[in-house]
């Protein structure tokens, strides 16, 4: 499949959005992203538009709480799907490195062994050696889930105390919570079931979030005690943070064409 290449100047008001879209389309052509993933991206884009395509103050608070929760976990697992791999494979590997004791697991809603393998190869490009959720042993099942995502790695998500699930489906997030896990998500939609079910929901684009998470984790690692990390988590109110994200979207104003440039 080919497409005509359109030159987008960096001064274009949607430059970054178009570049992210381009990455996803490339991921689709390379087999990493499912066709449904393109549609899910479109839903995310529309919320990002309303946010002003920036990391907001409530998102930063969620990032801080997520970083503290990550550092308090004994066995955190980073769950990677096609969209996350296409947009942030390198950064996920860097996050895994910063966390030191985490593992990365491929987990797909629209599962094919080929995509699983392609995603694992994409992660390997950035130095990740051990990747969970690939091959036959992924077949431990999350109770009560009917989609393919009930299949998780018995050495990964199944035994994790914390799971990072960016761009996740609500059924699975609910199932992970029922299994007693702490859940951190990145979801541009503050109204999704994933957002309202997770312990910490970062309402922001995964492309902006992961580098910010790494910065916060490195900072907290050097400067905070366990008690201080617990305090950060204890003071955090996810529902309040989601409401603040939604309020920002609702307060966006119609600008004239020149104002929006
Ligand atoms: P739920 O199942 O949680 O109710 P949903 O069915 O509306 O949510 P899904 O397709 O299951 O949506 O989940 C994908 C989520 O990822 C969507 O809420 C979408 O807004 C969000 N999303 C898509 N692209 C990005 C991105 N680049 N960064 C952050 N979030 C994104
Ligand atoms: Mg869904």
Image: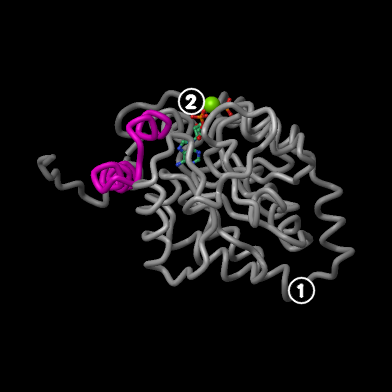
Stretch in magenta = 18-41
Closest to the observer, 19 or 197: 197
Kindly give the residue lying farthest to the front in the view shown.
136
Kindly give the residue lying farthest to the right in the view shown.
227
Q: Is residue 24 magenta?
A: yes
Closest to the observer, 229 or 56: 229
- SS class, disc 2: loop
Crowd class of label 1 (few under 14; some 14 to 19; many from 20; radius 10 Å): few
Is residue 220 among what the camera can see? yes
Q: Which quadrant of the rendered structure holds the N terminus?
A: top left
Closest to the observer, 243 or 225: 225
Q: Mark 2, mark 1: which one is toward the viewer?
A: 1
Is residue 13 among what the camera can see? no
Write down the residue under mark 2.
253
Q: Position of residue 201 (x, y in %)?
A: 65, 40
State the separation of the CA atoms marked 2 and 1: 39 Å
- SS class, disc 1: helix
Q: Which quadrant of the rendered structure holds the C terminus?
A: top left
Write down the residue under mark 1.
223
The quadrant where residue 175 appears: top right
Q: Is residue 60 above or below residue 219?
A: above
Q: Quadrant of ligand 2?
A: top right
Q: Position of residue 45 (x, y in %)?
A: 41, 34
Q: Position of residue 44 (x, y in %)?
A: 46, 33
Crowd class of label 2 (few under 14; some 14 to 19; many from 20; radius 10 Å): few
Asked if the residues shown at circle 2 and circle 1 are in contact, with their CB atoms under 8 angstroms apart, the answer is no
Residue at the image point whose x is 50% and y is 64% from the top = 93
């Amino acid at each position: 499949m080919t497409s005509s290449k359109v030159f987008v100047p960096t001064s274009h008001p949607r430059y970054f959005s178009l570049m992210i879209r381009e990455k996803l389309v490339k991921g689709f052509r390379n087999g990493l992203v499912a066709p449904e993933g393109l549609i899910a991206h479109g839903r995310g884009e529309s919320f990002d538009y309303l946010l002003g395509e920036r990391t907001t103050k409530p998102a930063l608070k969620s990032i801080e709480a997520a970083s503290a929760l990550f550092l308090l976990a004994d066995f955190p697992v980073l769950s990677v799907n096609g969209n996350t791999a296409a947009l942030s494979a390198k950064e996920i590997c860097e996050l895994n490195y910063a966390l030191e004791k985490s593992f990365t697991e491929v987990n797909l809603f629209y599962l094919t062994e080929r995509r699983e393998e392609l995603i694992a190869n994409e992660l390997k490009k950035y130095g990740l050696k051990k990747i969970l959720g690939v091959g036959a042993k992924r077949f431990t099942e999350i109770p009560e889930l009917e989609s393919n995502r009930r299949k998780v790695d018995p050495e990964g998500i199944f035994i994790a105390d914390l799971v990072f699930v960016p761009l996740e489906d609500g059924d699975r997030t609910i199932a992970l919570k029922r299994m007693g896990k702490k859940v951190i998500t990145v979801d541009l939609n503050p109204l999704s079931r994933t957002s309202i079910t997770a312990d910490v929901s970062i309402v922001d684009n995964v492309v902006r979030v992961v580098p910010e998470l790494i910065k916060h984790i490195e900072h907290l690692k050097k400067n905070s005690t366990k008690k201080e990390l617990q305090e950060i988590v204890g003071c955090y109110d996810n529902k309040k943070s989601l409401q603040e994200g939604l309020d920002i979207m609702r307060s966006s104003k119609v600008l004239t064409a020149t104002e929006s440039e």
